[in-house]
Amino acid sequence: MWEWVQSAFNGFIALMNTFRLTDVLDIAAVSFIIYSVIKLVRETRAEQLVKGIIILIIAFALSFQFNLKMLSSLFSSFFQFSVLAVLILFQPELRRALEQMGRSKLGKYWTSLASTPAEEETVKHTRACIDSVVDVCDMFHKTKTGALIVFERQTKLGEIVNTGTVLNAIPSTPIIGNIFFNKAPLHDGAMVVRDGMVYAAGCILPLTKNDQVSIDLGTRHRAALGISEYSDAVIVIVSEETGTISIAVNGVLTRDYTKETLKGELEALLLPQPKSAEEKIPIISGLRRGRKNEKSEKKSEDD
């Protein structure tokens, strides 16, 4: 027994003598990739696909162990195309992961190197657009008129724009109000704002795939959550039933905005901010779990 322990210890020492810094980096990189994959598929439909693949691998190992030739041959043929099958099955998750990488700090730094800084004219248009959207949403809140406004940020929404009508108009309260007038031909879709301009209207948005969203939310809110899961866009929603103003960002819905808090939140999300960030209103995270937070606080007015 002692000889086996000594032999194992000597083997461990010999292995550590050959251990290099690159091996540490290699292990850390693989560990990070495995952690990222688990985090990506956790609590999604891909989690069930992973469980199914694990079951197939176990079945293949058992068929090989018990020499079940026909079953082993069948599994071997299947796993020959496993890479292609994984790419097809996990296409939405892989796409989301690549988009998240592009929106990460490294991706933003790379973009800042490849492009010029935001011009003052774009910031001016964005600020004017925010003012117009806030005024319209306040009016819609009182008249209970439904609206769905998408502010494009880093992720371009060309596929969404192609489903609607390109306007490329200077933002103003009358234009946005006319778009969502209930007799207007474009009122049912979403309005897309790009670089502070009313770029397109009547656009069709993908619905959220989160099956735990509250049943109280209608199609507008589900579409807003869907595009916020698909991109980094900021979406403003006005409920046609209650007149409630909401914002969807990164798959999370916040509600009960007033004219003042809506303006402050949009400016914080869309305009270049100083280092001292202002406090945001509490997020109603329960909406993601299918229930509302009963104690929702509102953000105070800007100084």
Image (tube, helix red, strand yellow):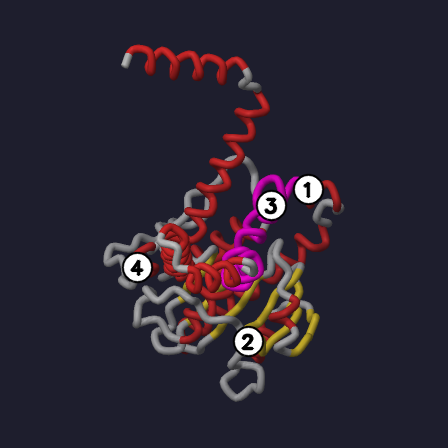
25 w.r.t. 163: above or below? above
Dots 2, 3 in contact, CB < 8 A = no
Q: Please state the total of marks drawn on the protein image.
A: 4
Judging by the rendered image, the residue that carries numbered circle 2 is: 204
Q: Which residue is mark 4?
A: 289
Mark 4 neighbour density, 10 Å: few (under 14) some (14–19) many (20 or more): few
Q: Position of residue 146 (x, y in %)?
A: 45, 76
Q: Is residue 80 visible in the rendered structure shown here?
A: yes
Nearest the viewer among 52 and 291 is: 52
Q: Which residue is mark 1?
A: 110
Q: Nearer the viewer, mark 4 or mark 3?
A: 4
Q: Residue at x 62, y 54 (%)?
A: 154
- The numbered mark, 4 or 1, whose residue comes first in the sequence reads 1
Callouts 4 and 3 close, C-beta under 8 Å: no
Q: Secondary structure at mark 4?
A: helix
Q: Secondary structure at mark 1?
A: helix
**Magenta extent:** 82-110
CA distance for labels 1 and 2:
31 Å
Furthest toward the left, the residue is 294
Label 1 packing within 10 angstroms: few (<14), some (14-19), many (20+): few
Find residue 57 and report its horizontal and vertical position in percent. 41, 54
Q: Is residue 253 visible?
A: no
